[in-house]
Amino acid sequence: MIIDLHTHSDASDGSLTPDALLRLAEDNNVDVLSITDHDTLAAYERISTTIPHSIQIIHGIEFSTRWAGYGIHVVGLKVDPGNATLQHGIKLQRVAREKRAQSIAARLTKLGIADPLPAVAKLANGAEIGRPHFARHLVNTGVVKDVATAFRKYLGAGKAGDIKSGWASLSDVVAWIIAADGIAVLAHPTKYRLTMTKLKALLDDFVAAGGGAIEVVCGQQEAAVTRRMATLARDFDLAASVGSDFHHPGLAWSRPGHCSKLPSDILKVWDTW
Ligand code: AMP
Ligand code: MN
Ligand code: MN
Ligand code: MN
């Protein structure tokens, strides 16, 4: 079984339509897939019901949250998309995202960049505006040479475009997911550059809020990382999840379903369903 519980479509900052993502996942022999766009379930309304595919789809979403001054991502899996509490949360996040886009634009303008918001909105094309859309605009207008530089200079941690104050708290987001009968998963735990002490403090709060799983595997990673994350999962009584965090085709190292293996003796999040 190939299972991938963390991917993005063009409903957020991925580049494939939901249908194209499903087809690519099928080509990569994925059996179970969750499309976990940033703060939106819009992809699920666009999946074509007339194109047959062999994939079991798990409703999912990746929420942006704030915790102790850090921007932390929480994936909700197997959520009931119609749940009113979840829908209300999504609405709050949409407002926060729109406000944040305006603040990022204002800060970039202060740095001498012509107001990027109209072009960024065009790039997002109706999707939730994210920092990657700003990054693409900065590349398109020649301000930076590539997306990585855009994050390093303007959008990444501690830079002008790094604004996380508007996001819901970690505990609120976990509560929305639980209200929608879903499982809250701490996304890509190694990506926050937290010390082990800080990561454990985060996990303490995550578990206290009702968090149920952690991404022990995120894409292709070193065995030592998997062992370390598996130990955390066991110590904090969390189930293990796995996802590629796929955004764009054409990158050899990032494809739907292409993830390192979970240890065989760990509780898998899908075994809790
Ligand atoms: P946002 O949801 O607007 O906060 O944007 C976060 C997204 O930006 C992540 O989900 C990644 O897709 C992308 N991202 C974050 N850091 C980088 C980076 N250094 N280079 C390229 N993309 C990044
Ligand atoms: Mn993203
Ligand atoms: Mn993320
Ligand atoms: Mn993601």
Image (tube, rainbow, N blue to C red):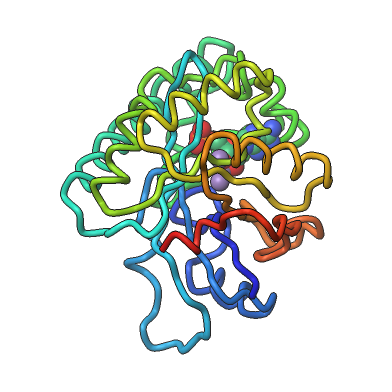
Estimate the x, y position of residue 133 in percent, counting from the top left.
54, 40
Image-based side of 249 in relation to 164, left or right = right
Position of the N terminus, as image quadrant, is: bottom right
Image-based side of 34 in relation to 97, left or right = right
Foreground residue, 35 or 259? Answer: 259
Q: Residue at x 47, y 14 (%)?
A: 68
Q: Residue at x 26, y 51 (%)?
A: 180
Which quadrant of the figure has residue 66? Answer: top left
Which quadrant of the figure has residue 60? Answer: bottom left
In the rendered image, the vertical position of residue 171 relative to residue 54, given as above or below: above
**Residue at far left of view:** 84
Q: Residue at x 52, y 43 (%)?
A: 238
In the rendered image, the vertical position of residue 187 relative to residue 270, given as above or below: above
Estimate the x, y position of residue 26 in percent, counting from the top left.
61, 79
Estimate the x, y position of residue 156 in percent, counting from the top left.
63, 24
In the rendered image, the vertical position of residue 178 relative to residue 100, given as above or below: below
Position of the C terminus, as image quadrant, is: bottom left
Q: Residue at x 51, y 40 (%)?
A: 237
Foreground residue, 68 or 271? Answer: 271
Foreground residue, 124 or 199? Answer: 199
Q: State whether residue 247 appears in this view.
A: no
Which quadrant of the figure has residue 255? Answer: bottom right
Estimate the x, y position of residue 224 in percent, counting from the top left.
83, 40
Q: State whether residue 184 appears in this view.
A: yes
